[in-house]
Image (cartoon, helix red, strand yellow):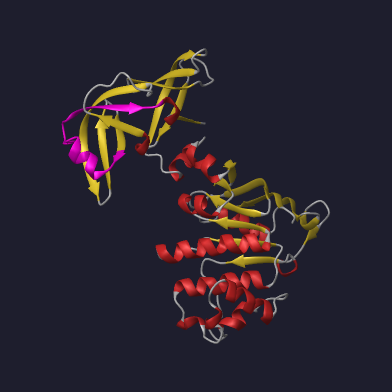
Amino acid sequence: MSALSVRARIGFAGVGHAAFDLDVDLEFPPGITAILGPSGAGKTTLLSLLAGRLRPAQGRIALGERLFFDAERHISLPPADRRLGYLFQEYLLFPHLTVLENAAFGARATRARALEWLDRLGVAELAPRHPGTLSGGEQQRVALARALASAPDAVLLDEPTAALDLASRAQILDLERMAQRESGVPFVHVSHSPAEAVRVADRAVVLEAGRVVQQGTPLEVLNTPRSLTVARIAGFENILPARIVEHRRQEGTTTVEAEGVRFEMGFQGGAIGSAIELAIRAEEILIARREVRDTSARNVIAGTVGEVRVEQDRAEVTVTTPLPLRVSVTPATVRRLELTVGARIYLLIKARAIHRLE
């Protein structure tokens, strides 16, 4: 199977809104690629370029050797000729058509292939019914069957689980994974959820203000953020401005300082005194009631509990060190360690738990 590739730029003038410019150079191999990023990053615009709903100012879009768009050669295939499946966030099923008729709607779709995909997706028995009688999860399965029934060369999915409850969301993601494996074509999946990307995708691409800021496997991207945008998407609770104090090349560490608190982290480049930003997950920080020296953690920092918030199976403790750090623990830990406001504690942070943002 061929990869879907895009090297394109498109700009929008700021009439009543801020000007926006999307400039990307990406390849989507067979498998599922999740597109992440904050609102306004260009995720849906990217899908519209691939689908042919928007035309870039310059660049090239192709599936293998088959050109969809080439500015220099004046090639621009309309959406119907690109042979792409498209799953919209709003489903866009025709209310006057039956489930089977909806699934078979498309230039290259057949009723037999539509019924086959409805069966694979577990909704074949709904074939004679109309969309208005279906649940959200059932409608999404029908929409996915429609996207696949035309035997597309690639599938584009625009936040396909946004309107679903947690149980239906998990089912749709599992079905999407199955459908991709059976079809073998590239799937491009736009999402706001990093957990969704980890569950369903082989690769992740993060967009910010129309540019690619990071890409790799979902776990690589989300566990080692290189920008503030990625750190926020990945749920890093502690973002700290700091400066480089010392390098220890032989030990493979760098000492940095944030508001008077020193941290040791993995070796970093950069001049002494230069400003950097750090990201630390709340769940990567351990709490002790007594100072611990014989530990693999390079950082043992004294602090005072400033706030404790308990929510069902999770608790967040804000610790003043003197800068505030958020720590994630279980409610049982709060009780066992008697983590009350004003309690004196020590934080243990491994060097590898501290990430530098670019």
Say if residue 162 shows up in the picture: no
Over which residues does the magenta segment extend?
A: 328-350
Q: Nearer the viewer, residue 7 or 219?
A: 219
Q: Nearer the viewer, residue 181 or 7?
A: 181
Q: Quadrant of residue 46?
A: bottom right
Image vertical order of residue 8 relative to residue 322, above or below: below
Q: Is residue 304 magenta?
A: no
Quadrant of image for the N terminus: bottom right
Position of 99 with respect to 262 (left or right) is: right
Image vertical order of residue 240 relative to residue 108, above or below: above
Image vertical order of residue 156 relative to residue 289, above or below: below
Residue 340: percent from the left, percent from the top?
16, 36
Position of 332 with respect to 208 (left or right) is: left
Which residue does the image show at 73% across and 75% down from the upper left?
A: 108
Which residue does the image show at 40% across and 62% down from the upper left?
A: 166
Image vertical order of residue 257 relative to residue 281, above or below: above
Q: Nearer the viewer, residue 329 or 275?
A: 329
Which residue does the image show at 41% across and 24% down from the upper left?
A: 242
Which residue does the image show at 41% across and 43% down from the upper left?
A: 235
Residue 213: percent from the left, percent from the top?
57, 40
Say if residue 16 shows up in the picture: yes
Q: Quadrant of residue 62?
A: bottom right
Q: Quadrant of residue 69?
A: bottom right
Residue 246: percent from the left, percent from the top?
45, 13
Position of 71 with respect to 337 (left or right) is: right
